[in-house]
Image (spheres, coloured by chain):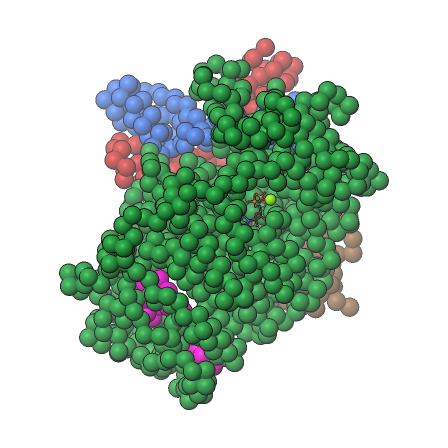
Chain colours: A green, B blue, C red, D brown
Amino acid sequence: MNEPVHRTLGLTDDELEKIIEILGREPNHLELAMYSVMWSEHCSYKSSRVHLKRLPVEGEHVLVGPGENAGVIDVGDDIAIAIRIESHNHPSYIEPYQGAATGVGGIIRDIFTMGARPIAIMDPLRFGPIDDARSRWVAEGVVSGISGYGNSVGVPNIGGETVFDETYIGNPLVNVLCLGILPKDRLVLGQASGVGNLAVLLGSTTGRDGIGGVSVLASAGFGDEDEDTEKRPSVQVGDPFEEKRLIECCLELLDARLVVGIQDLGGAGLSCAASETASRGGVGMDFDVSAVPQREMGMEPFEIMTSESQERMLAIVSPDNLENVLAISKKWEIRSSVVGKVTEGGQLRILDGIDGPVLGEVPASSLHEDAPLYNRPMAPPDDLNARKEDKPEKYLLETNDFSGDLLNLIYSHEWITSQYDSQLFLNTVAGPGSNAAVLRLKHPVTGEDTGRGLAVTTDGNHRWCAVDPRRGSALTVAESMLNLACVGAEPRALVNCLNFGNPENPTVMWQLSEAIDGMSEACREFDLPVVGGNVSLYNESQGTNIDPTPIVGVIGVIDTLDAPPPGHKWSEGDRLIVIGPEPEGLSGSAWAFGKGYRKGILRELDYDLHKKICQVTRELVQKKLVTAVHDVSSGGVGVATAEMAIASGVGCSLARISSHEALFSESSSRVVLAVNPDELTNVEEILNAAEVPKARIGLAHGDRFTIKGLLDLELQSIQNKWENHLPIAFEGGTTQG
Amino acid sequence: MQFEATVEVQLKAGIADPQGSTIENATLKLGFNGIENVRVGKSIRFAITADDEVKAKEIIQDLCDKFLTNPVIENATIHLQGVE
Amino acid sequence: MQFEATVEVQLKAGIADPQGSTIENATLKLGFNGIENVRVGKSIRFAITADDEVKAKEIIQDLCDKFLTNPVIENATIHLQGVE
Amino acid sequence: MSPTIGVIVFPGSNCEQDALEAVTSLGAKSKLIWHDSFDLGSADAVIIPGGFAHGDYLRPGAIARFSPAMESVFAFARSGRPVLGICNGFQVLTEAGLLPGALQKNSGLKFLCKPVNLTVRTTNSVLTSQTVKGDGLRIPVNHFEGNYTCTEETLEELQDEDRILLTYEDNPNGSMGDIAGICNAERNVVGLMPHPERACHPLLGSTDGQPLLKSFIESSEL
Ligand SMILES: Nc1ncnc2c1ncn2[C@@H]1O[C@H](COP(=O)(O)OP(=O)(O)O)[C@@H](O)[C@H]1O
Ligand SMILES: [Mg+2]
């Protein structure tokens, strides 16, 4: 191996120079390993940080914004909600079950780290085409991993997304959002303070799993490469039972106010937790590697410091409380060991025995704050203008099988969602399959029902973002707003997970920057603070980058939750109305992508109109004036109305939908309303007063799904297609090779 | 020819086995001493018809690679026994 | 003395094994012919220290009866191998 | 005096608070009992709630049944007091031998969370006394191992002794005889896979769990 060590660890020559400058000397191997994991893209956000700064982060209800393990907002009644989303894309490609399972475990730890009890997860997922056997293998494994871990750890899964598209064939996306609830005064931050306080490691033993790139440091010590990978598996195995006990143990410690600060161990393991707690608290730490319980014999200090073994937490405890902390850990059968102590100054010292030799010493904050920041070159695609011209509408003459096209676009997610416990804690008023998930809001300590509700939605649309990352991202935020309006909720905050390709590719960087701009613009317009997020880059395979896929999660509050929200079920005789602008364009639509038309131009979002549409939808829902409601998104009015008919078991006759655009366009700010004839005048008055465009499109009735002049289908045939789409596809079998 | 095959699928050596450790702890609590390193795997038995033993092994190996294991975290051991 | 033990836990003969049938069907879909009667069980490996082989077997049998199997639906086969 | 329902908590249980919420909403008192304690306190009846006791590692209920609290539940049950196992609790009771049979993986080999329709087969048990024979109840299931399995003799015995309490209308998991819930010969120990506590609030889509839990609470007053 001729390559200098730092380069094999993924550090550039400049980065090494910087480390030497910080330390005033050459780093040793242990120190180099810590810098290499902490300065990785994953932990340092070195390519994205300059852009993330543009996101608006302030808002009336924000208690904790980006920078901590999770964002926290105030939802009234002395209750706070912690929220965070994270990706586990790459591990899920090679070992779907465990990759997804450990993704769930990781995001849940971020939430109870804040003192919050995790009450819900959501899982936006992206897989390769469903007719590809390996993509099905990935999808099946990911879903059972989320199910296996989430159900067992006891956090209900209340929603998410599933998209199959060729752009994800070599790189699926597994994002998981978690929501936690806490009494406002229990909020804790991941910081160490109080010189002399102890660092206590809670949870699993530390093994060689997930030490990734830094394992090259030890390759000399082992024989052939096979043995080496065997000894240092890149895959971690999740243990939901350990995590469940860890949740209960940590929440009990926090309730009893026995810890000063607490931090989960995620990416970069102990290096990250030790340095982050110390630097946030403005202190240093002496860290004893020999005190870390190890799963395997003969682990090197750098292995211990960089291992990503799962289900571990680092708590900062004053010596007086140690005994009680150890007792509570014992009750929950959680392993606990004192591994360090808080020191003055800002140095993180790694020792072999707490009074033993110093193995490494770095300024704790340098692992974070001094991490390199890159403003990488950006460039729009060369053919940007030509792409804009290449609209799907150009190809309309070749295709006019409206029924077939519609049937191809509909599928029930039940094959997936029925594998998830969506009801635990008795909060779930609207679960998977709703416009947005709705939870009862109960006080986290007394259990008392506040009579109010929380609503959460996750949205992402790679099709829109492939066509135009800026507008696509803004539209994604807009869709979330509308989803919340459909359940009567007022939005409070947003989190995002930015899934992009290789940042060293200028087009990818341009996409990222554009997406952040679009998201920022929309968040500012909607007065929606960004309270946290995650960036996942290098989503590529064999040189092909995925379509840009920013995912957002938006949480809102429902003031009076005394009945389930209207949902998709209309009743026989309901009048059907679409509110919002005339549909325009098919670019970026599910219909167009299904046909292979992946280019074009997106219409700009009319923010004022969108706000009005959200407002009036919310009003109608809150006043219980509509039987059913469905925002128009993927698949256009065609899919929205078909889903409503399927949910209801009642067909419809529609008119005034007479073209591909009218049927499949996904242009924004539109909602389908089903209104009982008795309420029609009432509803139309409210719509008139709100000055929103509206059109009566038909009537809910019978057992056929009819659109005058376009199609006429038996409701049963749509229903069958919808129900059997995924089960039949998965019956085709899966293979991992 | 027909063979009885057993494929034992085990987690690779470095991979954590939470189920195994939990069982190990439970044996202690049940008063069984001296039990260590519990690892839990699958045992898959089936009958296979193939021209000869070599061929049978080949098929089973292929089956393991494609389907029965994920070589990233698991190993398979194949046992074969002729019945006719 | 230390022994390496493998306990193979199998469903009793009359008990339906949906996991086995699923694998069997999948092999067909993947184009593997001639695979039949697939049964899926657990293979539990561990190290055990005991005075001698007889004693070790006794302990393991007891462990199986009490804990490792559910006698309503499962059988166990014990394999033992001395290592010291 | 409203009775006190004790809810046993194992490491890995997760429906204990839900059980508590549901029975208190129906007027009972309730308290959690940690698995490590032999003391069931002043409980008039015991619920073993859903979840994944000890991670469901090895087999659901296999480790939990050895807990100190289970030893006391055994004696409690033998003395004729009401004991209810919901989902994981049902699995624990079969492993402990308090109820016959075993719960295997669902025939579809997937975890299954969804509302199902049940039929009441007998009102002669601590779980069904307030229901009407033949009535339909809509209650969610939430399990991977809910496929009730037993010998032909046991099944016959259950049928002959009228010990099948609830059956599935449309069998979701492969259970023998469409069995969703059974009781012991003395009819005071009951187990079922569906979650009645998830169907006790109008906002949650069904209140069909109420008559079951009311029966149970009432039986513990006697
Ligand atoms: N896209 C984003 N938008 C806003 N904040 C972000 C974004 N990505 C990351 N952050 C914030 O940066 C912080 C560090 O994130 P991360 O390193 O993923 O945390 P962890 O150490 O828990 O893995 C988090 O508080 C997160 O909210
Ligand atoms: Mg974190």
At 27% from the left edge and 50% from the top edge, which residue is drawn? A383
Whether residue A541 appears in this view of the structure is yes
Q: Which quadrant of the structure image shows residue B7?
A: top left
Q: Quadrant of the C terminus of chain D?
A: bottom right
The answer to whether residue A277 is above or below residue A52 is above
Residue situated in front as seen by the camera: A461 or A655? A461
Position in image of residue D32 (x %, y %): 72, 54
Task: Inspect the magenta stretch and tell me whether residue B5 lies in it.
Answer: no
Residue situated in front as seen by the camera: A660 or A119? A660
Residue D72 lies left or right of residue A676; in this view the side is: right
Q: Which residues lie in the magenta part?
A: A625-642
The answer to whether residue A667 is above or below residue C26 is below
Instruction: Please state the quadrant of the image where ligand 2 appears.
Output: top right
Residue situated in front as seen by the camera: A226 or D159? A226
At 63% from the left edge and 35% from the top edge, which residue is drawn? A366
Position in image of residue A578 (x %, y %): 36, 76
Position in image of residue A213 (x %, y %): 50, 28
Q: Quadrant of the N terminus of chain D?
A: bottom right
Residue situated in front as seen by the camera: A569 or A455? A455
